[in-house]
């Protein structure tokens, strides 16, 4: 049964993509249903697989030999991933209802956009599922690359200039990341002569240059995880991507980078070398820097999805710091990792629901605002750790840190949670300012409501090891709740101050514009050389044409002379003969 579910988990989304392709190229345009029930069901076999129990497969005929596994880590990861993909697909059916009507009425531009999205969506899902269950390098990298490049269609969908810019930033950073990952895999696998992720971990742990191998993989996966400096695609891509696409981009795909770290780094291993510990310290500092700087920059954004994008960067900064503890303090990892997985799952559902909520505020259902706005706020409040699964999640990561006496990190994470509360408050405020009537489709708000429920009760349905997650004791509640009130107070104070100061919003993408400027400046000499070569080429072409023209004129004159000689050759020959005769007579007389 588990083997059948595994096959369905991988072949079902592939079959859905093939069905979409057949429908696009064979069925009449007016009958296209881009978001059919088949399309909605693409993630369902994977969701069932996650609850089937732990299991391992070895498939010798698969590429270099497939090693696939569902264990205590990958089961919950697959569960929240498949659930969010399912909810986002249902949300997409309502979100794109108007575009589908335009496509069925004959709008060819919309038809092309929907065909591209509906075809590459299940392929991105397929890659996401494959990288979660893969334990061999080839399968993992194939899944990661497939998810990465198929997701381009999710960003560029609208085709506007801003969408093309966001997609450009995404694909440039993605290619850089893929190159770094491939380099890290080839180096570490070649060093240990291994084909598995376990072998990569062992190679990094014992190899002389293991820290450099780990650094390549950290940076490569850090592109997807939004590590500071490599995060610039997120605030450019999210505001232009459709809401359901943003939900899976920020909820599940960004977690692929986190899972990559957990899969290849020797977290919690005994005998950690000093360079690896130093790498962990760098990751810890980078994660905390992202948590605070993204929050500070994000609160000044005007687009609610840009604010949420910076919130994702901030939250992933916290997760980066927690993963780094597996290198800095290996003894803590065995009790810390369940909290990290719960953190990732709760963030996925809460953030995915917040992004879906942006489409609700853009086309508000005909409900009372007193009902809509608390529902919009619930996942954000939970993300800040104040209610439901958010409280449990914060305690799940704080408790192991308390036990290992990492009090400073606990305080820093608590203050980072203030940034989360501030960002969520600003996002809701921006949604309120930009709210529009119009009535959401039932598919939209249905998936959104289920997402809210799933985010609030994440520990109840996530298949984590028994007793690995506990409720925080009552005496700890104040320490978990205070960041929400402080964050809201800071935002309210900032809003009052900014009423007297006219400030423009800093551009989304922050360092992207610096990178673009530096690259443009660096390409300046190259452009000048290119311009000089182009001018030299033009001058050479002009000179050659002039020489060719002169040569052709000379040839023309020669041809004219030849033609004249051809017409007078008989007379010339007679004159020549007469001349020769005269010369002979004259010579004879001498």
Image: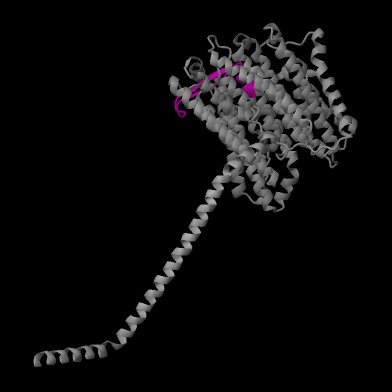
As drawn, 322 above or below 556: above
Residue 77: x, y in percent? 64, 22
Q: Quadrant of residue 337?
A: top right
Left or right position of 539 against 311: left
Rendering quarter of residue 572? bottom left
Give the colour scheme shown. one colour
Residue 53 appearing in the image: no
Against 541, residue 480 (above or below) is above
Quadrant showing the N terminus: top right
Image position, residue 559 (x, y; %): 35, 78
300 vs 70, nearest the viewer:
300
Where residue 326 appears, x then y in whole percent? 61, 14
Left or right: 74 in relation to 422: left
| Residue 185 in sight | yes
Nearer to the camera, 551 or 567 = 551
Q: Which residues are magenta?
A: 49-78
Report how many numbered discs are placed on residues in the image: 0
Left or right of 429 on screen, residue 181: left
- Residue 336 percent location from the top left of the image: 65, 12
Image quadrant where one finds the C terminus: bottom left
Q: Is residue 271 within the magenta segment? A: no
Q: Residue furthest front?
A: 590
Task: Check residue 67 for magenta coloring.
Answer: yes
């Amino acid at each position: 049964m588990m083997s059948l579910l595994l096959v369905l988990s991988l072949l079902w989304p592939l079959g859905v993509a093939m069905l979409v392709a057949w429908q696009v190229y064979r069925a009449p345009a007016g009958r296209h249903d881009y978001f059919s029930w088949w399309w909605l069901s693409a993630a369902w076999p994977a969701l069932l697989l996650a609850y089937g129990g732990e299991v391992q497969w070895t498939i010798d005929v698969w590429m270099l030999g497939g090693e696939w596994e569902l264990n205590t880590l990958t089961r919950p990861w697959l569960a929240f991933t498949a659930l969010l993909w399912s909810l986002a697909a249902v949300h997409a059916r309502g979100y794109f209802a108007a575009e589908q009507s335009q496509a069925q009425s004959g709008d060819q531009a919309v038809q092309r956009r929907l065909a591209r999205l509906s075809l590459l969506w299940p392929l991105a899902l397929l890659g996401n599922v494959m990288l979660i269950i893969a334990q061999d390098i080839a399968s993992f990298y194939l899944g990661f690359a497939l998810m990465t490049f198929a997701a381009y269609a999710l960003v560029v969908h609208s085709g506007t200039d801003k969408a093309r810019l966001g997609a450009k930033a995404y694909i440039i950073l993605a290619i850089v990341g893929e190159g770094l990952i491939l380099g890290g895999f080839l180096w570490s696998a070649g060093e240990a002569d291994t084909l598995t992720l376990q072998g990569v971990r062992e190679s990094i742990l014992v190899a002389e240059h293991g820290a450099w191998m780990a650094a390549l993989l950290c940076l490569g996966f850090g592109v997807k995880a939004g590590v500071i400096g490599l995060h610039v695609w997120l605030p450019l891509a999210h505001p232009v991507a459709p809401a359901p696409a943003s939900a899976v981009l920020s909820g599940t795909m960004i977690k692929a980078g986190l899972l990559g770290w957990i899969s290849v780094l020797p977290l919690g291993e005994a005998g950690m070398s000093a360079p690896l510990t130093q790498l962990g310290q760098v990751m810890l500092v980078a994660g905390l820097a992202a948590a605070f700087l993204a929050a500070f920059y994000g609160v000044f954004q005007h687009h609610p999805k840009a604010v949420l994008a910076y919130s994702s960067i901030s939250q992933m900064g916290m997760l980066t710091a927690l993963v780094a503890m597996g290198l800095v303090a290996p003894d803590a990892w065995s009790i810390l990792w369940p909290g990290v997985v719960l953190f990732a799952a709760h963030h996925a559902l809460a953030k995915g629901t917040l992004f879906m909520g942006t489409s609700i505020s853009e086309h508000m259902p005909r409900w009372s605002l007193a009902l809509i706005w608390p529902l919009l706020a619930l996942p954000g409040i939970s993300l800040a750790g104040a209610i439901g699964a958010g409280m449990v999640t914060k305690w799940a990561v704080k408790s192991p840190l308390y036990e290992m006496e990492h009090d400073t990190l606990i305080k820093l994470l608590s203050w980072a949670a203030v940034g989360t509360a501030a960002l969520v408050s600003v996002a809701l405020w921006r949604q309120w300012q930009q709210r529009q009537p119009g009535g959401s489709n039932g598919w939209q708000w249905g998936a959104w409501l289920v997402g809210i429920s799933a985010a609030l009760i994440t520990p109840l349905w996530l298949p984590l090891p028994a007793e690995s997650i506990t409720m925080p004791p009552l005496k700890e509640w104040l320490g978990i709740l205070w960041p929400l009130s402080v964050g809201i107070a800071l935002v309210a104070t900032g809003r009052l101050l900014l009423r007297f100061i006219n400030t423009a919003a800093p551009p989304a993408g922050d360092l992207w514009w610096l990178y673009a400027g530096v690259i443009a400046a660096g390409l300046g000499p190259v452009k000048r050389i290119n311009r000089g070569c182009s001018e030299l080429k033009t001058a050479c072409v002009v000179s050659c044409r002039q020489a060719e023209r002169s040569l052709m004129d000379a040839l023309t004159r020669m041809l004219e002379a030849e033609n004249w000689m051809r017409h007078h050759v008989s007379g010339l020959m007679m004159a020549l003969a007469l001349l020769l005769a005269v010369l002979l007579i004259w010579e004879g007389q001498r």
